[in-house]
Image (cartoon, coloured by chain):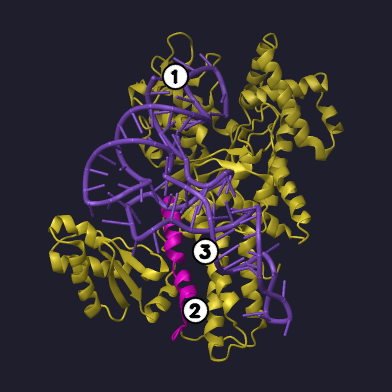
Chain colours: A yellow, B purple
Amino acid sequence: MQEIQTAITQLVQELFSIQTDVELTRPDEQFGDYSTNVAMKLSKQLGKNPREIAEMLAEKIRTESGAVVADVSVAGPGFLNLTLTEAALAAALSVQPAKSLAGKKWLVEYSDPNPFKPLHAGHLYTTLVGDTIARLVEHAGAETIRLNYGGDVGRHVGISMWAIVQFLGGEHPEKLADIPEAERPTWLGKRYVEGTAVFEEDEAARPEIIATNKRVYQLHAENDHESPFAQIYWTCRKWSYDYFATLYEQLQVVPFTRMIPESEITEEGIRTVREHTAGDPLNTTGSGVYVRSDDSDAVVFRGEQTDESLHTRVFINSEGIPTYEAKEVGLILEKWRAYQFDTSVVITANEQEQYMRVVLASIAKFAPEPAQRTRHLNHGIVKLQGGVKMSSRKGNVVTALEILSAAREAGEATGTNPSEETILAAVKYAFARNRIGSDIAYDPKESIALEGNSGPYLQYAHARARSILAKASEQKEVGLSGLEADERSLLRKITEYTEVIERATNELMPHHICTYLYELAQKFNQFYEHNRVIGSGEREAVRLQLVRTYADTLKNGLGLLGIAAPERM
RNA sequence: GCGCCCGUAGCUCAGUGGAUUAGAGUACUUGGCUUCGAACCAAGGGGUCGCAGGUUCGAGUCCUGCCGGGCGUACCA
């Protein structure tokens, strides 16, 4: 593809003395293998009819590129449609996706669950998105660091700790042992919901909760593991991390390189913010990136003074407690200190988009490199059928683990007894096939669909091919030539793979892979329907080769989505 | 009010580096298993691409306005 692009660019240069970008697209199969609208783009500049330009180029291509291009035609308003020779098409199979990120260090932060809170459907989604993005950049050759950041300090923890102590009737860590292991995550979730209700409705209790929150920060500052309060905290925190590990294990995502609890970067965040706060005793830099609020002791960044589309946000509140913003400052600086990354991708739900822009704009003023190299990728939220938003604060959540168990149940109900691999394929594919950024309308029934445009369809289309290969008596390497129409059509689709992977990687948009793999599998199923492989006489060797290449391609693509490609199902 | 995002078939979504006839899945109707796996394949109906202007030889795609929805908009994350 690259060669054709370059060749046409040169032809344009020779014929018209114009330097232009030639875009090649994959048109409808009936039009050929590649297509370009370059003639139409040049039309105005040259003052010529686009068809005339296209004809001139076509003539040149016919005489000069016979080894690669078998047929050129001019169509419609001036499209140049190219059909490759069999040899060129077959040669395209050996092209691997470019290692475009070789030598680069990429950080990918995702999942980001908060201890003391339940894992809801959104966590499942964001974990899967991150896992796929990380697989993509790693596949493109980057040294890939997978980070998982979580709020083990912050108001939600204060709220939970307050409710936990209430439930235990005081600071009695020994009573935690009474809670059965299997119920711990749910138990913690309930305490959080109770605490939130009190915090929102009971003004008298609010100062107590705020004080509890401060004690959590204090406990970290003093490295306290001994006091009864600290024992409760560390025990419950561990319960949460164990619970997260359960989800990751069930999802079979690639293990994280490092978990970064907020408590680890809080101090650096506060210190950095204060060092850049006008009038702060700790200000050693003389900079006034952050300022004291006019009406309280809060430390804020006045985003609108940098860019009208930004707004003011609080980094340290009037209680002296760092908000998410100050912690994010600490996190980004810690990432930079520890890894000196080329690119750092942070994956969150899109409700945090504005917030992240403000934080990055502030950091850019004193640490431009990490700020500029940080990319915020926001995805949509998971909505229940009917558009109801889930909120862990209100307790109306579908948890991440419930989605998996619901998928298993629905799988059983189909009577096909799908394996865990297939259940996971269904769930992962259902989320992955949507473009990152738009909301996901989650329908528990449809997400586990075992037919149509789904993960199990792809696995089935793979297993079918492997089954043929397993039955073949011998497989030898043969050249792909003298192809019949159906064979060529399948080959043509397979050769799109590298282009799709490169596009998905460049755009960080894995859903392109889903779209493609589904089309590829469809192509195979169509081929399968109309053509025998084993026992097809002289065609057998070529068809086996084609089926093997197809199956390998499908398996690789599924791998990038974290979906298994079983031999049988 | 301001900022960002979204509006494509009944439903769920691709297509958004402008371009050849707007595509899938699902649902509905129907046909195909003595033939390498029917979790499959094939056929049919179903769309003023939110509305209105504009740019262009050409707009689902770019620009403007409007309508509808989501998120954010100072001490939550």
Q: How many marks?
A: 3
State the residue position of label 3.
Answer: A519
> Tag 3, which secondary structure?
helix
Residues marked 1 and 2 touching at CB (< 8 Å)? no
Label 2 sits on what residue type? Glu
Q: Give the answer, above or below, for where A315 lies relative to A115.
A: above
Closer to the eye: label 1 or 2: 2
Of A383 and A170, nearer the camera is A383
Q: In the visual, does A502 lie left or right of A514? A: left
Q: Residue at x 43, y 14 (%)?
A: A292
Q: Which residues are magenta?
A: A480-507
Query: SS for tag 2?
Result: helix
What residue is shown with label 2? Answer: A487
Residue farthest to the bottom, as pictured: A538
For the residues labelled 3 and 2, say whether their Cβ atoms are less than 8 Å apart.
no
Horizontal and vertical percent position of residue A499: 42, 63
- Residue at figure coordinates x 30%, y 60% from the top left: A23
Chain name for mark 1: A
Disc 1 from disc 2: Cα separation: 64 Å
Seen in the picture, residue A192 relative to A3 is either above or below; the reply is above
Q: Residues within 10 Å of mark 1 (few under 14, many from 20)?
A: many
Q: Residue A374: x percent and y percent?
A: 42, 40
Callout 3 amino acid: Glu
In what quadrant of the picture does the C terminus of chain A appear?
A: bottom right
